[in-house]
Image: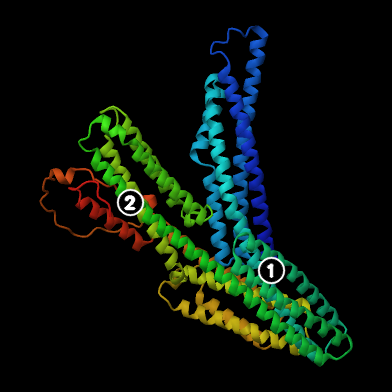
Amino acid sequence: MPVASELQRAAQEQLEATAERLEELAAEAARQAKENRNLARQAAAQPEIEEARAGDKQDRLGFEERQDLQRALEDQEQLTDEVDSLRAELAELERMMEEAGQSNPELAKDLKELQELLEQLNDSDLQERMDELAQSLEEDDLQRANETLDQLSRQQEDFRDRLEESLARFRRAAVEQDFRATTREAEELARKERALADAMREEDDPDLRPRQQAELRDRAEDLESRMERLGERLTELDEREASAGVDQARKSTQQARVEMGEAQEKATQGRNQEAGQEADQAAAVMERASQELQAALDDMAQQQSEATQAALQQTADDALSLARRQSQLGERMRGASQEQVASMRGDEASLLQGVENMARSLQEATEGAFGGNPALAAQMGQAMESIESTIQAMGGRRGSMPSPYAQSEQTVGQLNRLALMAIASAEQMGQAQQQSGENAAEQLEQLAQEQGEVMNQTGQLMPMELGQQAMAQQMQELAAGQESIASDLGDLAEEPGSDETLGDLEQMAQEAEALAQAMVEGRLTPETVRRQERLFHRLLDAGRSLEREELSEERESEQPGVFERGEIMPLTPDQLGALRYQLPGPDQLQRLTPAVRQLVIQYFERLNRAGAEPGGTW
C-alpha cells in the first residue's frame, strides 16, 4: 500500500488535472457556442422559402446543414460526457482515499462539494435543448433544428460561464490539498528521522544508517522546494498569513536538513551515538516544521469558514432588505392604474439587479460553491425568476396573467425564503464542528480513519530494517494510538443501538486491544499489519452499514390501536383557503437538520397566521 503522503499527493495531482481539463472544456465550449451561433445566423439569413435551391443544389445544401447540426449536437454531447466522467473520477478518488484510511474531513468535504459543482454544470435547460435538436434532426425538420441551434448556442455560453466559475473552486481545492499533502510529508519525515535516531544509537547496522540518513536528507531538500512553491501558490490566492506560516516551516525544514547532514557525516565516521543525537535534533526541528504547517493550515481553514459564514449572513441581510423593498413596491401597486404600475418597472428591475449583485458577491466569497449548499443557489435562481415574472406582469394587460400585486407577494416570499436558507446555512457551518462525531456512524468513520493512520505508520517502519531496540521504541509509541482506538471502540459498544452495526463492536475492541498488546511487546510482523488492515476495513463496513440504515426509506407497518370516531365538523372557508405563503418543498426541507427544519415550518406558520396583512417581511 502506498504511504499516506503519496496518496495525499496523488489526490492533489488529480485535482490539478481536473482543473486543467475544466479550463480546456471552457475553451472548447466557447468555440462551439461561437460556431453554432454563426451557423444559426447563416440559416436565419437564408430565404424562408428556398425556391432558389433547385434539384441537386437543394439536396446538397440540406445534407450539409444536417451534417453541421448533427456535428454540433455530438460535440456538445461529448462535452457533457466529459463533465460526467470528471465527476465519476472524483467519486472514485473519494472512495479510494476512504479505503486507504486517508479521507480526512476537509478532503472529503471538498470532494463532495466539487462533485456537486460538476453535477450542476449539466443543467436541465442545456439537456432540453440537446433533446430538442436531436428530435428535430430525427423528424428532418431543419427549420426547427436551426432555431433550436440558436437557443443551444446561448445555453453553451452559460455552460462555459459555469465552467469558468467552477475553475476557481477547483484550483483552490488543489492548493488546499497541496497544503495537506505537504503537512503529511513533514510529519512522516519527522517520524522516520526519529526512528533512525534510535537505530543509530543501537549500532545494529552501521553501514545501512548513513545511506538511510542521506535518503531522508534528500527528502527534506525536496520538501523545502515543495514548501517554497506552496507559499507562492498561497500568495496567489491572497492567503498571505498561511504563506508566511509555510515559509517559517520551510526555514525549520532547512535547519533540519543541515542537522541531518551532520548526522550522516558522523554516522559515516562511525560516531554512532553522536549521530543519533544529531538525528534526534533534526527530528525535533522537523516535528516543529510539521506543527507550523498544521497551525497555518488550521488558521486558513478557520478564516475561510468565518468568511463564508459572514458572506451567508450578508446574503440573508441583503435578501431581507430586498424583500422589504419588494413589499413596499407591491403596496404601491395596489389600486394603481395600469399605466402607473408600468411606470414602476424600473424600480422592479433595480430589485433584480440587487439579487444578481447579491448572487455575484456570494459566489465570489465562496468561489462558486455557495457555501456548499446547492439548494441555496437554486433558491437564488427562483428569486430572480420571480422578479422577472413580476416585471412581466407589470407590463401586461390586466387579466392576461397574475396581477402585479399577487406576483409581487410571491417574490416577497421567495426573497424571505432565500434569507432563511442563508441563515440556516451559516448556522449549520457554525455548528458543524460541535456536531461532528455525535452519532455512531460518524464515530465509527473517525475510528476507521484513526486505525488507517496507525496502519500506515506501522507500514512505514517495516522497510527501515530497524534493530530490535529501535523497533520496540517505535512500536511502544504506536501502541498508544492502537490502545486509544480499542478504548473508544469499547465505549461505543456499550452505547444503545451498537448491535445494529455490521459486525460485533465488542469483538473489534478486543482485536484492537490484542493488536496494541502485540505492539507493546515489539512484535511487528506481516501478519500484524494484515490484522490491522482487516480491522480497518471492518470499521469502515460497520460505519457504512449505519449510514445506509440512517438513509433507508423503508417503512414498517404497525398494528393500529383502538380509537374513538369523533364527530366530523365541516371545514370553514378559512380552513379551505390556500396558504398565502407556501412551505418549501419536501426535497428542500429534507436537506435541513431537524432543528432548522422546525424553524422553517414555524416561520411559515407565523407568516400565514398574519395573512390578513399581506406583503409583510420579517
- Residue 170 in picture, x, y percent from top left: 60, 54
Q: Is residue 307 left or right of residue 385?
A: right
Residue, disc 1:
5
Circle 1: residue type:
Ser
Task: Tell me the element at label 2.
Answer: helix
Task: Tell me the element at label 1.
Answer: helix
Classify the position of the C terminus by image quarter. Answer: bottom left
Q: Residue at x 54, y 61 (%)?
A: 109
Q: Nearer the viewer, mark 2 or mark 1?
A: 2
Give the answer, above or below, for where 440 lies relative to 345: below
Which one is earlier in the sequence, the residue at label 2 or at label 1? 1
Of residue 319 and residue 434, the one placed in the foreground of this image is: 319
Give the answer, above or below, for where 197 lies relative to 23: below
Q: Is residue 604 left or right of residue 450?
A: left
Q: Is residue 596 left or right of residue 483?
A: left
Of residue 499 and residue 57, the one placed in the foreground of this image is: 57
Instruction: Tell me which corner region of the image, top left, top right, bottom left or bottom right, holds residue 230.
Output: bottom right
Q: Residue at x 27, y 52 (%)?
A: 617
- Residue 566 in picture, x, y percent from top left: 12, 53
Residue, disc 2:
416
- Residue 252 in picture, x, y percent from top left: 70, 78
Instruction: Tell me which corner region of the image, top left, top right, bottom left or bottom right, holds residue 208.
Output: bottom right
Tag shown at residue 27: none
Q: Residue at x 43, y 70 (%)?
A: 435
Give the answer, above or below, for where 290 lies relative to 520: above
Circle 2: residue type:
Asn
* Label 2 – label 1 distance at C-alpha: 47 Å
